[in-house]
Image: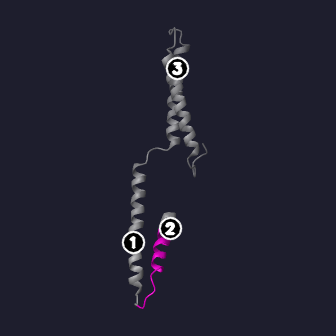
Amino acid sequence: GASAGMLAAYFGAAGMMERCSTEVYTVLDVMGKSYFQLISSIAAVFICYAVDAAFAGDTAAKLAVSAYGEAWSGLARVLGSALSPQVAEVPVRALVEVAHSLRAAEALGLQAEREPRYWRAPW
């Protein structure tokens, strides 16, 4: 919306800034050139929007939710093994992996907090 409005204002102003002369212009001479430039620019904006929409990744909120889910699963696995009577010792590596996954989820959560939430629930 705003991009198309700016393009319309730019090309409209370019048509009004013609030099003064004694030559008689028709509407098609002045507006025809601007009209086709405007249509080409708006088409380019829509193509860019379509490509961005087609190749856009998941939002930070979706990535954070999946990261928190993975961290929670890892934590449940470590706690399950720690509370199991058959396991004598919980490997430190498992605890470090859970800590790393929680840090990654927290970083994604901070990014999710900064993204626009228009119709979505607050983060």
Residue at label 1? 37
Residue 2 left/right relative to 53: right
**SS assignment for the magenta stretch, majority:** helix
- Looking at this view, is 87 or 27 the one in front? 27
Residue 33 location, quadrant:
bottom left
Residue 38 location, quadrant:
bottom left
Q: In this picture, is 69 found above or below 121?
A: above
Q: Earlier in the sequence, mark 2 or mark 3?
A: 2
- Looking at this view, is 40 or 70 the one in front? 40
Amino acid type at mark 3: Leu
Residue at label 3? 95
Residue 8 falls within the magenta-colored stretch: yes
Image point 39% across, 72% down: which residue?
37
Image point 59% across, 43% down: which residue?
113
Image quadrant holding the C terminus, namely top right
Residue 105 falls within the magenta-colored stretch: no
* Disc 2 from disc 1: Cα separation: 13 Å
Give the magenta part as a residue range: 7-22
Q: Earlier in the sequence, mark 2 or mark 1?
A: 2
Element carrying mark 3: helix
* Disc 2 from disc 3: Cα separation: 54 Å
Q: How many marks?
A: 3
Q: Residues within 10 Å of mark 1 (few under 14, many from 20)?
A: some
